[in-house]
Amino acid sequence: MIVKNEEELLPNCLNSIKDAVDEIIVVDTGSTDNTVTIAKEFKAKVYHHPWNDSFSEARNHCLNHASGDWILQIDADEELEQADIPKLRLAISDNRYNGIIIAIQSIIKDGLHTFYHPRIFRRGKGFYKDIIHEQTIIEGERLPTEIRLYHHGYNLDEKKMRIKWQRTTHLLKKQIAQNKHDGFAWFNLIRNYRIQDLFQDGINAGEEALKIMSPVPFSNHDKTDISLHHYVMIIYETANCYLYNEDYSKAEELCHFALSKLAESEIEPENIDIIFTLACIYLKEGDYRKAIDYFERFLLLREWYLKNINRISLMVDTMGYDYTAYNGLGICSGKLGHLQTAIDYLQKAIASNTKYLTPYKNLALCYLSEENLVEATNTLLRTITEGIADDEVLLHLGELYIKQEAYEKAIPYLEAHLKTCPENKDTLLNIARCYEKLGHWEAALVGYKSALGE
């Protein structure tokens, strides 16, 4: 581990690995809080190393202190799934592999985003490159697994996230200044802007990168050329910035350009990230049949990628987006009038990611279209159980109970909605009507007067 001022998250991380490893090596790069003390409480071997604006340099230094046969790299904002420790022990007993690919599940506002990355490797068989968003270079074969590592780094408060993005932007620009043809750095810079909703900045960076970068065609003997892959990933991120900026035609044009470049070089299968983006573009454009085709192509490609993940050394971004694809298929099917198909897809989306709120709302709308108030209500109630309900869900639950004349059940949800949306007079009126229906005249009168501003 490399750390700096991680006292808030470090205990959870170290507690998750203490029973899975033989030694904990912590390299501190200048903490001024209790990070070092906490690490020593977990019997970690703590070393100090100056921060030189390079994650790879610090990580490679950290490797020098390890004495075990295997390295597990983890960050302070991550935790290992305890149930997967036996899987970890089994994986490192396989002599055929020098690296182990695990499932990193980032906790985000839409639930979990899963991507696969080699975080475990034999000592002496792996090292790091790039100053930020460092890549792990491993000699030999890698074993794909479903060992889970939960990442909390994208779920921090707004101030911490802003500081994090600013630091990332600075380091990526520094990396590009050192090598303007560094496609991976350009890709991450554009993504950094997109994640912050700075879509125009992302577009500007993307267009600049595409002018500078020129894809090197794959030879007939080398199908692992990284430059073309990074070129396509730059297009992917830039297209997404255009998509979020609602310039759908430009986003679509870029995606098809990327696919044509890959086809020219006879690269198979199709790029899964580009196919997913095209599906989203067609959904936004209202071309639901074409969107369905591309979401289905994405899901088929995903199966291929999962089966061949040990052979894929390059970054794949959308591998964990099956739940989003199922949600998209549900929306498209519903728009085309195929309600039962829509319901089936939306249920798959929820099963794939129970913390993703959007399909719950879409599923409730499908049930409402069938005038099935009970199932619509039960669907939204599940979001309460999962702890993901927002103000809109609370309002809709109140309205659904009113339609079912369950006024007593409606009131708590409407009042909860009103606390965060006090300007909503319609909600206040609905609360007053509920009290009136229940015969609570004084409470109803107070509500009506408040709604009228008296």
Image (tube, helix red, strand yellow):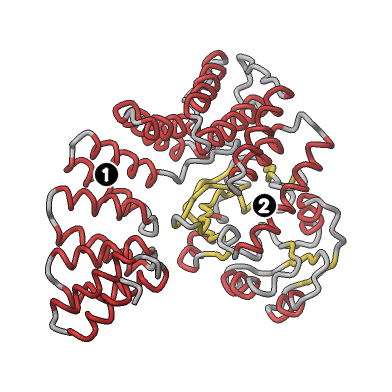
Residue 5, picture quadrant: bottom right
Q: Is residue 104 left or right of residue 421?
A: right
* Residue 414 falls in image quadrant: bottom left
Instruction: Between residue 270 and residue 293, name the one nearer to us.
Output: 293
Which secondary structure lies at badge 2?
strand
Q: Residues within 10 Å of mark 2 (few under 14, many from 20)?
A: some
Can residue 176 be seen in this snapshot? yes
Q: Mark 2 points at which residue?
A: 122
**223 versus 336 height, above or below:** above
Tell me what residue is drawn at x 58 percent, y 35 percent.
Answer: 237
Task: Name the one closer to the observer, 300 or 446.
Answer: 446
Q: Residue at x 57, y 15 (%)?
A: 265
Q: In this view, does 390 lie to the left or right of 443?
A: right
Residues marked 2 and 1 touching at CB (< 8 Å): no
Query: Which numbered circle lies on residue 345?
Result: 1
Q: Give neighbour class at mark 1: few <14, some 14-19, many 20+ (Cα, 10 Å).
A: many
User: Of helix, strand and loop, which one carries label 1?
Assistant: helix
| Percent position of residue 206, x then y | 65, 31
What amino acid is found at the position of numbered circle 2 in the picture? Answer: Arg
Q: Where does the image place residue 331, in percent across and percent down from the top left?
A: 29, 41
Where is the C terminus found, in terms of image quarters? Answer: bottom left
- Any mark on residue 261, and which? none
* Rendered location of residue 189, percent (x, y): 68, 41
Task: Name the residue nearer the viewer: 24 or 321.
Answer: 321
Whole-percent x and y of residue 421?
40, 67
Kindly identify the amino acid type of the residue bearing the numbered disc 1: Tyr
Residue at figure coordinates x 57%, y 17% from the top left: 261
Image quadrant for the N terminus?
Answer: bottom right
Earlier-in-chain disc, 2 versus 1: 2
How far separated are the C-alphas under marks 2 and 1? 42 Å
